[in-house]
Image: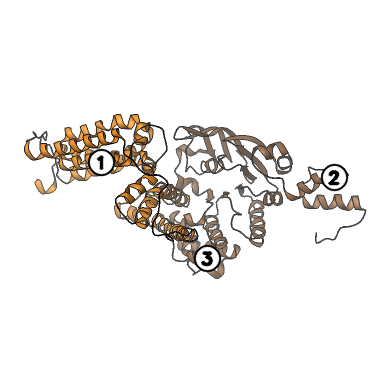
Chain colours: A brown, B orange
Amino acid sequence: MIEVSNLHFSYDSKEVLHNIDLKISDGEFVAIMGENGAGKTTLVKHFNGLLKPTKGEVVVDGVSTRDSSVARLSRNVGLVFQNPDHQLFSETVSQEVAFSMRNFGYPEETIRKRVNFILETLDLSSYTESSPFMLSGGERKRVALASILVSDPKHVILDEPTIGQDYQQKDKLRNFIVQMNSQGRTVVIVTHDVEFIVECRPRIILLSKGSIIADDSYDRILSDSELIERASLTTPQIGKLMWSLRDLNFDPKVLDIYRAKAILEEMMGKVVPQDL
Amino acid sequence: MSLRIFEGFRFTYRTTPIHRMDPRPKFLIALTIFTLSLIFMNIMILLLLLIGQLPLVYISKSVRRWLNSVKGGAALAALIFIMNFLTGSTLVFSLTMTLRFLVLVSAFSLFFMTTSPDDLGLVLEKAKLPYELSFTFTTAVRLVPTMALEAQTIIDAQRSRGLELDRGNLLVRVKKYIPILIPLIVSAIRRSMELAEALESRAFGAVKSRESLVILKMKPSDYAISLIAVAILIAGVYVQLSIPIPSLDTGIRMPTLWSL
């Protein structure tokens, strides 16, 4: 469990996080959203101890981040950074992915097995001996993801995972994240991508100017126009459609494509084709 | 590990007399401090050179950032002291070398904090340096804090993968910087190529004779400050060459293996 209580964080006497209180239970799926500069990345950097609170406390699985090193916390909290180019350095993709496991002191045989498994899972097995610098942006992003997931952390934090991914890769990423979560891992995503979030259906923690302004289910938050405006987000496409049809008695709070389809079927009195 | 030292080398616009000053007298002040700190080996004079900068730092309203750069340099200063003292230098000599480093960090931090890279470019152009070269220099100055921030992000990313920079012997620690340096170099090369493309697509270098929108003009106060800086420099050189300064070195040193 990740518990944040009364967290304040200042950088150069400017307060970037203000009185943050939250709990993320084991196996939960949470999205942290908010405008640029809201403090999303700063908040998640507290989860593996990269940043220590100016005031308050962050406790991960019963251990205060003040009392533990980043290396120790990183065994349980995997943080995937936004820009993969900030971490790639090895000659081959497999060496890059194995880096964290070597740092954690796993035996070579376990490393080999885990690396092969994760490269296969993330569609990277054909690049095992390729240089990570020769891959496309989306592929580099998946290598960065693989290099964190390889050590099987209990909590996975993904900072803007959909940036630079095409639609097919986004779909694969979503399936993978949902699968990881269903296997019991805590997943925390930092993102602006509302369409991606609607498909993942997580709990949303909404930040604005360093404070939590809402903490609720995805459908309640993303259908609240005032919150969306405050956090510089946008309503998902289905929500916009339902809002524009509200005079015809469509529910503007519907964001899910399957619920929208059911409503349309009911209104039109016929079945809409399955491949909608 | 923090790279906040580079914060103290980043220009931030403020309306203070130091910021408004022409860059040339400011450079002369930095050059005077630089030269005096190199020619004098007296701890009191170096202390005076450091303390003498404090009013300028205060007037430029940059105390916090100046402190950051001095604090950032403290680790390296400590290393200079330890290396000197452990290798048989006297306590006072080791302190003097440490102080000299801090004086230099402070002087150039003050210069870069209060001088815009654009003004620096204008000075270089006035000195008849080709525009391509002055542009390269000012871009490099401008990118130092950006690269420092990037280096900090890379360090964070690698620490999140279990890299512990502060463990192991010296050789192991040096090797641990490979995962930091490679992404930093690759990113710098990538950035420079993107910058070159962006510049070319905006017709950089298409016109041989350039006209500047802003023209640097020295005010009487700038001339006065330049004169004072040059006078202090000449006086310093004269004192060093002709007046014997008593040494404060008491000869205290750490016993080394080869002296036992």
Residue B45 visible? The answer is yes
State left or right for residue A72 relative to residue B231.
Answer: right
Q: CA distance from mark 1 to mark 3?
A: 49 Å
Q: What amino acid is at disc 2?
A: Phe
Q: Nearer the viewer, residue A210 or B180?
A: A210
Residue A218 lies in quadrant = top right
Q: What amino acid is at disc 3?
A: Leu
Chain letter for mark 3:
A
Residue under label 2, please give it: A250
Q: CA distance from mark 2 to mark 3?
A: 46 Å
Q: Secondary structure at mark 2?
A: loop
Tell me the tag on residue B28.
1
Q: At 11% across and 38% down in the image, what residue appears?
A: B238
Relative image position of residue A53 (x, y in whole percent): 49, 35
Tell me the tag on residue A135.
3
Q: At 68% across and 40% down in the image, what residue appears?
A: A228
Residue B251 visible? The answer is no
Q: Nearer the viewer, residue B70 or A221?
A: B70
Give above or below for B105 relative to B197: above
State left or right for residue B185 relative to residue A84.
Answer: left
| Dot 1 and dot 3 residues touching (CB under 8 Å) | no
All told, the count of numbered labels is: 3
Chain letter for mark 1:
B
Mark 2 vs mark 1: in front:
1
Q: At 66% across and 43% down in the image, what residue appears?
A: A233
Give above or below for B192 relative to B116: below
Relative image position of residue A22 (x, y in whole percent): 60, 36
